[in-house]
Amino acid sequence: MAVVGVNGVGKSTFLRTISGVQPALSGKIKIKGENLENISPERLATMISLVLTEQPLSKNLGVAELVALGRQPYTNWIGTLTIEDRKKIKEALALVKIEEIQAKKCYELSDGQLQKVLIARALAQDTPLMILDEPTSHLDMYHKAQVLKLLRDLSLRTQKVVIFATHEINLALQLCDKIILMKPNEVVQDSPQQLIQKGHFESIFPADLIVFDRATESFRIKT
């Protein structure tokens, strides 16, 4: 599920709020019928894994070490990894197909490789819900498509719910089952096909420059 909309409409605020990173401005958030405010941080870490746009991390860590941090909610106070923990780490590395770089330091990686490592860490956390804030920022066109295709494949293979904010609306239309479209005065949620049929994408941007082409189901520059 992609969360899309213009800059400043509240995509990151929405994701940070539903994941418990910041308090809600209003309303209630429920996970499996339980109020988020009643869920301890320790238990929430077994329910939601996060990949934020700017994450504080030491790039001196090795790839396997960073992925292993995803097991923190399950280890003891000194972080001892069990056989089960090591199995989950190995599975995450394999799912994202980064086994060949697991011995590298994070500072040696490209932006695309580092993004895959962060996704693997979230997978190792083994939560039913993964939330990612603009996972393709700083990537070129090929690697944007590669990361979003990876997220779709992981969702299908692991049966996890993946929610991510993105500016890559054209890619989201091709890959996502559902889209949350945020506008300044309205939020709609539906399948890409239903949103297209109802004309929701035609009013996102000022029509003087960018238009939505129903024939190709994509945005194009007006010439």
Image (cartoon, rainbow, N blue to C red):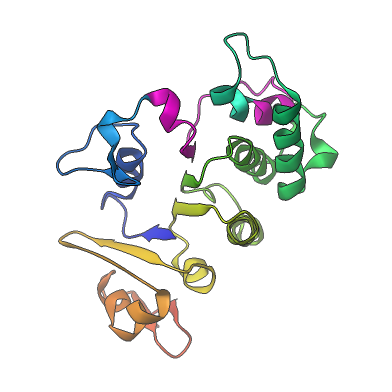
Residue that protrudes farthest toward the right in the picture: 100
Q: Nearer the viewer, residue 181 or 209?
A: 181
Q: Position of residue 59 (x, y in %)?
A: 65, 24
In terms of image quadrants, where is residue 154? bottom right
53 magenta-colored? yes
As displayed, is residue 174 above or below residue 152? below
Q: Is residue 88 visible?
A: yes
Q: Position of residue 88 (x, y in %)?
A: 70, 36
Q: Which residue corresponds to the image point at 81% horizontal and 37% vertical from the top-left?
A: 101
As displayed, is residue 60 above or below residue 24? above
The quarter of the rendered structure image containing the C terminus is: bottom left
Q: Position of residue 41 (x, y in %)?
A: 39, 25
Q: Which residue corresponds to the image point at 50% horizontal and 30% vertical from the top-left?
A: 55
Q: Is residue 208 visible?
A: no
As displayed, is residue 174 above or below residue 198? above
The quarter of the rendered structure image containing the N terminus is: bottom left
Q: Which residues are magenta?
A: 41-68
Q: Is residue 89 left or right of residue 42?
A: right
Q: Is residue 50 left or right of residue 35?
A: right
Q: Is residue 206 left or right of residue 173?
A: left
As displayed, is residue 40 above or below residue 12? above
Q: Nearer the viewer, residue 160 or 104?
A: 160
Q: Which residue corresponds to the image point at 44% horizontal and 24% vertical from the top-left?
A: 42
Residue that protrudes farthest toward the bottom in the picture: 215
Q: Position of residue 139 (x, y in %)?
A: 59, 51
43 magenta-colored? yes
Residue that protrudes farthest toward the top in the picture: 78
In terms of image quadrants, where is residue 167? bottom left
The total number of labels drawn is 0
